[in-house]
Image: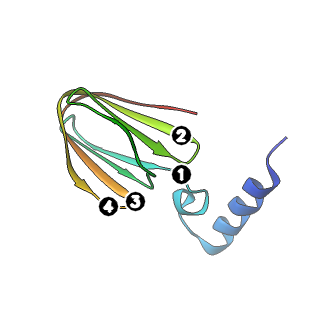
């Protein structure tokens, strides 16, 4: 059965024509080829090595895996990771 709060948020988003990531507090992940990954709506860094960047994003954990990974920009809600990105995965 759908979560009532989630359903109400979706209805409000449609009514106000707001993006789902804003209404539902979901992460937005944007890739530029395999050289840059931007994650919006993150809530902190879980792990950071040249091979793995782990992020908390609400109920999700996002993992950016690759080689020579570097955080090139970090704000309270947006992070940019650059390097040779092999995969991006998320867990609930």
Circle 2 sits on which residue?
A: 60
Is 35 placed above or below 40 here? above
- The reply to whether callout 4 and callout 3 are in contact (CB within 8 Å) is yes
The secondary structure type at the circle numbered 2 is: strand
Q: Nearer the viewer, residue 55 or 25?
A: 55
Q: What's the residue at 65%, 66% (across, down)?
A: 14
* Circle nearer the N terminus (3, 2): 2
* Circle nearer the N terminus (2, 4): 2
Q: Is residue 92 left or right of residue 65?
A: right
Q: Residue furthest bottom?
A: 16
* Label 4 environment density (alpha carbons within 10 Å; few <14, some 14–19, many ≥20): few
Mark in the foreground, 1 or 3: 3
Tell me residue 41's x, y (percent).
Answer: 45, 56
The secondary structure type at the circle numbered 3 is: loop
Q: Is residue 20 left or right of residue 83?
A: right
- The reply to whether callout 3 and callout 2 are in contact (CB within 8 Å) is no
Q: CA distance from mark 2 to mark 1?
A: 9 Å
The secondary structure type at the circle numbered 4 is: loop
Mark in the foreground, 2 or 1: 2
Circle 1 sits on which residue?
A: 26
Q: Is residue 15 left or right of residue 75?
A: right
Tell me residue 34's x, y (percent).
Answer: 21, 34
The secondary structure type at the circle numbered 1 is: loop
**Badge number at residue 77:** 3
* Circle nearer the N terminus (1, 3): 1
- The reply to whether callout 2 and callout 1 are in contact (CB within 8 Å) is yes
Quarter of the image with the C terminus is top right
Tell me residue 78's x, y (percent).
Answer: 35, 57
Q: CA distance from mark 2 to mark 4?
A: 18 Å
Is 89 placed above or below 8 here? above
Circle 4 sits on which residue?
A: 75
Is 73 placed above or below 53 here? below
């Amino acid at each position: 059965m759908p979560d009532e709060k989630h359903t109400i948020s979706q209805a409000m988003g449609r009514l106000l024509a707001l993006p789902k990531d804003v209404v539902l507090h979901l992460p937005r992940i944007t890739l530029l080829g395999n050289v840059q990954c931007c994650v919006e709506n993150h809530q902190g860094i879980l792990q950071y090595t040249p091979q793995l960047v782990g992020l908390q994003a609400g109920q999700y954990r996002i993992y950016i895996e690759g080689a020579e990974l570097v955080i090139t920009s970090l704000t309270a809600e947006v992070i940019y990771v650059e390097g040779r990105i092999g995969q991006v995965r998320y867990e609930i």
